Image (tube, rainbow, N blue to C red):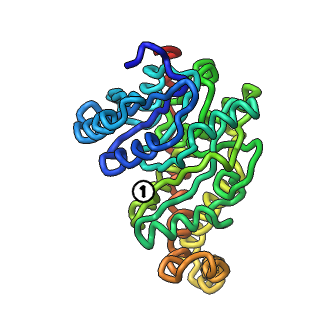
């Protein structure tokens, strides 16, 4: 490790990421170097020898950018972020995910946005990258109003927002706020943005900060992902009850309405015809969504869009109710303020 602290520390939580970490690191190493230098810290399970070996192999390819391995015994994403943050030396912290591919100017765009806006957090939009027809349909759903709602970081734009994808922060901001909440295995980035805005800071979306992330390539993978997202959002709502947005409440209410309709259909057979109308209308809306976007994707991907949206809506809604009813999360585990 260089005796001179770099200007930027890129922190990457890596769990089960052996297939992707090398490509992510190569993309970072191929990008622009920020003035003052950069280091990369990969936090993974102590026994994950494969991911560690790939990270260290990338370090040998480019000696001008140190790549360090940080053990994350807890295994969760926020614990990994905090472990990497504790070992980081840069004045600016940039988060990256192992499944993401940053554009060549990603880090320098983060620095430019922080300097230009004075924001406490900057970041870009969420752009999916699918390797299967299902995965490409997921990427399409992330930008569709029925999949993204009014989330600016999914639909594009610039300016103050409630959250961004990944993120970059002055180190002093993270130290002052205590890092990432380790009680939230999901949704910890959104919860951190809530604390930043509650403290008077700004979260800024900049379209110049570009990256893509690998989408789930199967229905089962997407269902597990959104089941976890729903539970994570519920845990955040228990800590910050006023943070729930309409786009997040709608799938939860729709899932509850479907469950209630099923129950009524069982106890009131005479109402079954009427109870079928809302699900039928829902399916027609989803089919219309696919037809309306016929020019945006090939048919081999587009026909899967209704199924993708169903998986997203219902698994998120069920996960939300499961998370809301399972009890309160434990206290946060703040990050250490220094290396």
Q: Report the label total.
A: 1
Position of residue 113 measured from the top left corner of the image (x, y, whole percent): 69, 37
Task: Tell me where residue 186 appears, x and y as whole percent.
Answer: 50, 42
Left/right of residue 265 with respect to residue 62 in the rendered view: right
How packed is label 1: few (under 14 Cα within 10 Å), some, or many (20 or more)? some
Q: In which quarter of the image is residue 277?
A: bottom right
User: In front here: 18 or 285?
Assistant: 18
Looking at the picture, how far across and down is residue 86, in whole percent?
Answer: 46, 20
Please give the name of the residue rendered at 53% of the width and 15% of the height, measured from the top-left corner: 337
Disc 1 is placed on an element classified as helix
Q: Which residue lies under the disc numbered 1?
A: 224
Compared to residue 209, the image places residue 227 above or below, namely: below
- 107 and 132: which one is in front? 107
Residue 254 horizontal/vertical position (percent): 63, 64
Indicate the quadrant containing the N terminus: top left, top right, bottom left or bottom right.
top left
**Picture quadrant where residue 269 is located:** bottom right
User: Which residue is located at x 51 percent, y 26 percent?
Assistant: 37
Examine the rendered structure and indicate whether residue 164 appears above or below residue 246. above
């Amino acid at each position: 490790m260089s005796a001179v602290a770099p200007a930027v520390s890129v922190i990457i939580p890596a769990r089960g990421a052996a297939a992707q970490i090398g490509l992510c690191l190569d993309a970072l190493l191929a990008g622009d170097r920020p003035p003052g230098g950069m280091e990369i810290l990969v936090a993974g399970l102590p026994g994950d020898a494969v991911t560690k070996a790939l990270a260290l192999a990338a370090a040998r390819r480019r000696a001008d950018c140190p790549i360090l391995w940080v053990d994350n015994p807890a295994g969760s994403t926020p614990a990994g972020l905090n472990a990497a943050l504790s070992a980081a030396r840069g004045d600016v912290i940039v988060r990256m995910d192992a499944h993401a591919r940053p554009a060549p100017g990603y880090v320098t765009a983060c620095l430019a946005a922080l300097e230009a806006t004075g924001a406490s957090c900057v970041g870009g939009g969420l752009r999916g990258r699918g390797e299967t027809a299902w995965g490409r349909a997921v990427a399409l759903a992330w930008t569709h109003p029925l999949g993204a709602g009014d989330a600016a970081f999914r639909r594009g734009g610039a300016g103050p927002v409630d959250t961004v994808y990944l993120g970059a922060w002055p180190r002093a901001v993270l130290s002052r706020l205590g890092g990432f909440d380790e009680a939230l295995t999901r949704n910890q980035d959104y919860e951190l943005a809530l604390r930043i805005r509650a403290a008077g800071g700004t979260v800024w979306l900049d379209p110049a900060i570009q990256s893509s992330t690998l989408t789930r390539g199967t229905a089962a993978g997407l269902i597990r992902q959104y089941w976890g997202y729903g539970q994570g959002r519920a845990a955040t709502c228990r800590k910050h009850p006023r943070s729930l947005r309409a786009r997040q409440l709608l799938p939860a209410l729709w899932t509850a309405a479907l469950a209630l309709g099923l129950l009524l259909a069982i106890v009131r057979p005479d109402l079954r015809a009427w109870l079928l109308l809302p699900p039928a209308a829902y399916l027609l809306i989803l089919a219309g969504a696919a037809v309306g976007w016929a020019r945006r994707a090939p048919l081999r991907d587009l026909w899967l869009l209704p199924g993708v949206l169903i998986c997203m809506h219902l698994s998120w809604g069920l996960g939300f109710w499961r998370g809301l009813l399972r009890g309160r999360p434990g206290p946060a585990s703040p990050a250490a303020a220094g290396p």
